[in-house]
Image (cartoon, grey):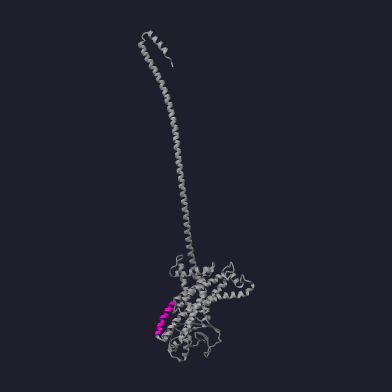
């Protein structure tokens, strides 16, 4: 059967042609095309990977921020707490010292009042004595015009007055 | 794989039964108007020959009676030829003569096939006999003992060269578009080709061959696009298509041989070890197994060769068979011919769509099987009994 008998000429031409086609296409078509496709795929993959990395970094950053924020918040709370404690302390201390001071002032004032009173009493006593002496002198001058009377009176008084 | 084999056998059976059927009808159909003779009315060296046919030459009548049946018509269409018949308008054949190259003891003879005048004349001691070149003696009788090689550019060679030029032009233009738009997405035609390339790489080469697939990519891409393009060219009914390149056994033989040679060259230790020292088998059985393995190894390219040849040829035969039916029935009665033509055109249209699928499918199958053979040649066997 003619159909299944391969012709020699066709085999020869086919071998030559196909070898040339294989060579030309391999060198000038498939190599650059495959390289270009590979390059493009690589660049796409790289882009995707770097996007993924960026996303991860973003996430990490966000987590960091969150952590920092939480830390800051905790710190602030701590500080506030400390501050309020300090305030209480300061107030308590101030109160305490004020009390003490007040007490001291009051004590001092009492002392001063006491001494002033004492002074005033003394002065009053002196004044009273002077006045009494003056008064007595005046009375006596009037009454004791005569000598005997004077002497009687003095004597009488001297008896009743005890010096204190 | 088996399904494909079965399918191609089905095709052949269908095609050949159709062929037989149409041959029977043709004997009556063409018997009465088949006597004619071609007379040259023009210069034979022109690029396109026009032959006017003068009717009624009784000397040739018996020759034509056997000749113009559908079987012969189909065989002529799917076979090779030394000129490219394009059309017959009235009684005028429009053909492109192709160069004849003959190598014999005296060296190369190169001349146009128009010198043969379609088998009517001898030239340089050679003659066309039923489309084949034969050596003739001085007196015109056929010289059976002469030894020569017919290296002519036949219709199939010419069709193949045209398709190859188209293929190279196509792929180089695609490659240059990649160089221009570096890193950019492919556009238009390059996009279409890239789809094919990625298909071969991701669906064929990578899963079949494994990590070493890059080495075989150029060959796989070349056979895929070569077979696909030639299959498509074969479906175009007029010049520059119409030749049956991938349905020619010489072409598929060379393609299968390329695959076989590349497989053998790249075969590693475990590939050859599997054939000549089947592992896991007692040595006494080697005498039985080694021939089987060798047959299995040789069987692969033979199967490749036959599958492509049979599928494409069967497709051509079926379509031509449908068309022949029109003329067979038309010869019986005009009405019958018209009626059948509706059916024939419908069926042929359907077949054409099927053949478009087959054109892709066979290119894919050939590439896939080649890739599988390469894969088995370069595979590193971790355990030995996975293939048997």
| Along the line of sight, the residue nearer the viewer: B267 or B95 | B267
At x 56% / y 76%, what residue is drawn? Answer: B299
Let me know if residue A79 appears in the view.
Answer: yes
Between A33 and A57, the residue placed more toward the observer is: A57
Relative to B153, say whether B386 is above or below.
Answer: above
Location of residue A74 in the rendering, given as x and y in whole percent from the top left corner? 46, 47
Instruction: Between residue B187 and residue B363, name the one nearer to us.
Output: B363
Please identify the residue farthest to the bottom as the structure is shown: B58
Question: How many numbered badges does the structure rendering display?
Answer: 0
Assign the C terminus of chain A to one quadrant of the image. top left
Q: Would residue B342 be counted in the magenta stretch?
A: yes
Q: In x, y percent, where is residue B106?
A: 55, 84
The rendered magenta stretch, by its main secondary structure, is classed as: helix
**Residue B132 screen position, x and y as percent:** 51, 84
Outermost right residue: B284
Magenta-tinted stretch: B335-350
Image height of B167 relative to B89, above or below: above
User: Does residue B226 appear in the picture of this structure?
Assistant: no
Residue A78 image offset from top left, x and y in percent? 46, 44
Residue drawn at point x = 46 percent, y = 40 percent: A86
Relative depth, front residue between A59 and A149: A149
Residue A69 lies in the magenta stretch: no
Q: Is residue B280 above or below residue B20?
A: above
């Amino acid at each position: 059967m003619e159909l299944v008998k391969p012709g020699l000429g066709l085999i020869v031409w086919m071998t030559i042609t196909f070898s040339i086609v294989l060579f030309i296409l391999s060198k000038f078509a498939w190599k650059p095309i495959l390289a270009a496709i590979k390059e493009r795929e690589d660049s796409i993959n790289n882009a995707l990977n770097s996007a993924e990395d960026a996303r991860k970094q973003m996430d990490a950053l966000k987590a960091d921020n969150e952590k920092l924020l939480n830390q800051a918040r905790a710190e602030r709370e701590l500080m506030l707490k400390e501050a309020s404690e300090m305030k209480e302390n300061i107030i308590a201390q101030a109160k305490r010292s004020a009390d003490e001071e007040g007490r001291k002032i009051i004590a001092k004032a009492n002392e001063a009042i006491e001494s002033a009173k004492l002074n005033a009493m003394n002065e009053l006593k002196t004044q009273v004595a002077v006045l009494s002496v003056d008064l007595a002198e005046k009375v006596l001058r009037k009454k004791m015009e005569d000598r005997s009377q004077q002497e009687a009176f003095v004597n009488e008084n001297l008896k009743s007055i005890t010096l204190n | 794989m088996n399904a494909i084999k079965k399918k191609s056998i089905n095709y052949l059976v269908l095609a050949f039964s159709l062929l037989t059927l149409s041959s029977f009808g043709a004997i009556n159909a063409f018997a009465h108007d088949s006597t004619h003779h071609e007379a040259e009315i023009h210069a034979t060296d022109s690029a396109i020959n026009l032959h006017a046919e003068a009717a009624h030459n009784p000397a040739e009548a018996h020759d034509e009676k056997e000749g113009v049946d559908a079987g012969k018509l189909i065989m002529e269409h799917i076979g090779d030829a030394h000129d490219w018949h394009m059309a017959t308008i009235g009684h005028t054949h429009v053909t492109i003569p192709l160069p004849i190259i003959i190598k014999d003891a005296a060296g190369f003879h190169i001349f146009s096939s128009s010198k043969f005048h379609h088998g009517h004349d001898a030239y340089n001691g050679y003659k066309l006999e039923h489309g084949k070149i034969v050596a003739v003696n001085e007196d015109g009788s056929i010289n059976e003992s002469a030894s020569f090689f017919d290296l002519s550019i036949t219709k199939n060679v010419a069709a193949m060269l045209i398709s190859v030029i188209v293929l190279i032009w196509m792929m180089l233009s695609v490659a240059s578009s990649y160089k221009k738009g570096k890193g950019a997405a492919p556009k238009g035609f390059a996009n279409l080709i890239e789809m094919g390339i990625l298909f071969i790489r991701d669906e064929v080469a990578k899963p079949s061959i494994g990590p070493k697939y890059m080495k075989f990519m150029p060959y796989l891409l070349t056979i895929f696009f070569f077979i696909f393009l030639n299959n498509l060219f074969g479906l175009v009914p007029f010049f520059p298509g119409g030749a049956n390149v991938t349905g020619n056994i010489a072409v598929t033989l060379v393609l299968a041989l390329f695959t076989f040679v590349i497989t053998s060259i790249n075969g590693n230790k475990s590939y050859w070890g599997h054939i000549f020292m089947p592992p896991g088998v007692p040595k006494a059985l080697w005498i039985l197994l080694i021939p089987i393995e060798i047959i299995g190894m040789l069987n692969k390219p033979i199967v490749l060769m036959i599958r492509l040849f049979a599928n494409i040829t069967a497709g051509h035969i079926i379509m031509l068979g449908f068309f022949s039916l029109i003329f067979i029935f038309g010869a019986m009665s005009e009405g019958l011919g018209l009626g059948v033509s509706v059916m024939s055109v419908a069926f042929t249209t359907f077949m054409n769509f099927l053949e478009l699928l087959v054109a892709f499918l066979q290119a894919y199958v050939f590439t896939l099987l080649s890739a599988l053979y390469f894969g088995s040649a370069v595979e590193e066997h971790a355990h030995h009994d996975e293939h048997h």
